[in-house]
Image (spheres, helix red, strand yellow):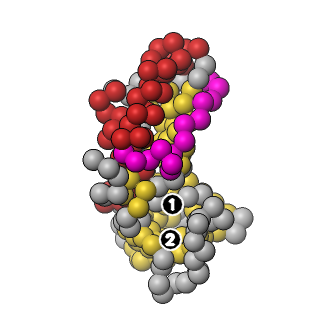
Amino acid sequence: MDSFHAHTSPFQLEGQFLGFISKSDGHFKSIRLAIGERELQVKLDKGLRHSGTFGLAAGDWISISGQQQFNSSFTKLKLKAYQVNRLSCNLSCKTSETLTNSAPSSTVSGSGRKKGKILLCNKSDCANHGGKELHQILEKTLGQLGLSDHVTIEKTSCQKRCSKAPNLILMPGKARHSKPNPKSIDNLIRDHYCNDNSCSS
Ligand code: FES
């Protein structure tokens, strides 16, 4: 078995944010970064995994710092992120921000509501197994949290998880959820689109 403990050193990378890889509970596990033509996946430290702490959109220019660990033969590398900074926004950002290494314009723990969309499966298995009610609850919750102008609901075709209907995906981040408990929707939305106290209570 490879040992990843002997060769550890800090790293800092800059590139374009592509998205997150989520765990089944909806929290982010890794972050996807494009550097030139190459894509890297960097595991997030536990403190960064709570999805509500992110306000990134695909295309944002970001820097990631953390620790890299090589195995004993230097043939495998693991990257773990301890800090993610947004350096500049993608084209959909309202304010243009200057790319700088020394003064990042915002960090993942910054405040503000996140823009995004909810992809709600509208095919019959989902629609007939709670999807319509889920749509109403989502709309109501977005309104209550003051997110109606930030987060849209988009109906989709089959998301290939029909046995777990109803299904939805929270964007950005592609966080997939199945059969969400109606009582958990408020927390689900807050976790994904609100930073700290940025949403109405
Ligand atoms: S019908 Fe919704 S996932 Fe297939």
Q: Which of 196 and 104 is in front in this view?
A: 196
Direction from residue 165 to residue 52 in the image, left or right? left
- The verdict on residue 147 being magenta is yes
- The residue that appears at 72% across and 64% down in the rendered structure is 37
Q: Distance between the residues labelled 1 and 2?
A: 7 Å
Which residue in the protein does label 1 denote? Answer: 56
Residue 7: give x, y in percent of width and height: 41, 73
- The residue that appears at 58% across and 66% down in the rendered structure is 94
Q: Earlier in the sequence, mark 1 or mark 2?
A: 1
Secondary structure at numbered mark 2: strand
Q: Give the range drawn in magenta.
A: 145-158
Residue 175: give x, y in percent of width and height: 48, 42
Looking at the image, residue 76 lies above or below residue 136:
below
Q: Residue 86 carries which label?
A: 2
Q: Which mark is residue 142?
A: none
Specify whether residue 140 is in view: yes
Q: Do the residues labelled 1 and 2 touch (CB within 8 Å)?
A: yes
